[in-house]
Image (cartoon, rainbow, N blue to C red):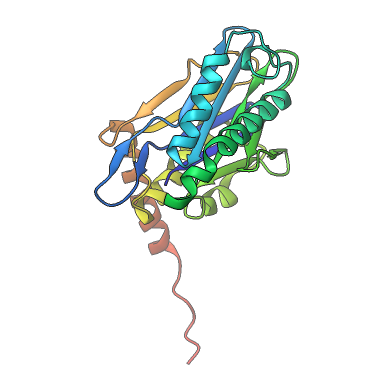
Amino acid sequence: MTYCLGILLPEGLVLASDSRSNAGVDQVALVKKLALFEVPGQRVVAVLSAGNLATTQAVVTGLREAAGSGRYGQDLHAARTMYDVALLVGSKLREVIARDGNYVQPFGDPNGTFLVGGQIAGEPPRLFHIYSAGNFVEASDRSRFLQVGETKYGKPILDRALNDATSLDEAAKLSLLSFDATMRSNLSVDAPIDLLRYRADSFSSRNFATLEKDDPYWMALRKHYAEGLSRLVASIPPPPNLA
């Protein structure tokens, strides 16, 4: 499985994915699940994937091969809006599933899902969740984060702490804590974690980082959070004696 997260804020976007792929306890691999498509000064598009690895890789490879071709409806670099990008990714996903799905079905689920986030000059940053059917929903100021994959463990901290005033740096920390909670409860999610902090109107992916298991910042963040949570619990009065 996997876990991918996208957060839409007034300052920009935070996008993160893990790197674990497994088809059984003895078939574990590390796979990059965050693909970047960038035209400096014009657009930055990130495509994060979860689900059947062959399906999602076929979609991303198809997008890469068409990038720069100038073919409208196929070339991410020619898309006029992020809505058009979401349509394009959904269409490519339907194409791959229609081609391969019946052959894959006897052996497993052929479906995949995607988060697509970024900015194209002339509009603000946008974030979409694309379902296996190729349709999608968009994040908004009332629903600022979207998840795919193993979503349930990392959701509570986002529900509690994320709001309109959250900065990109704070959102990045919350993202990593969301991954920490997921990794503690589910062995199918693991580092390295790819993390992009995209500042609105920068049209650059320079704030991209990969955190390995032994990354000093990642280790310190997990340690500080665990210790802080323990101190907080210790500071709360015990429940009243109702006996």
What is the number of callouts on the image? 0
Residue 241 shows in this picture: yes
- Relative to 73, 148 lies left or right: left
Residue 174 shows in this picture: no
Residue drawn at 42 percent across, 30 percent down: 194
Residue drawn at 49 percent across, 81 percent down: 240
Residue drawn at 52 percent across, 15 percent down: 65
Near-viewer residue (120 or 105): 105
In the image, farthest residue toward the front: 103
Residue 82: x %, y % from top left:
69, 24
Residue 175: x %, y % from top left:
49, 39
Residue 127 position (above or below residue 2) = above
Near-viewer residue (170 or 117): 117
Residue 241: x %, y % from top left:
47, 85
Q: Quadrant of residue 236?
A: bottom left
Residue 129 position (above or below residue 13) = below
Q: Quadrant of residue 13?
A: top right
Residue drawn at 50 percent across, 35 percent down: 49
Q: Quadrant of residue 219?
A: top left
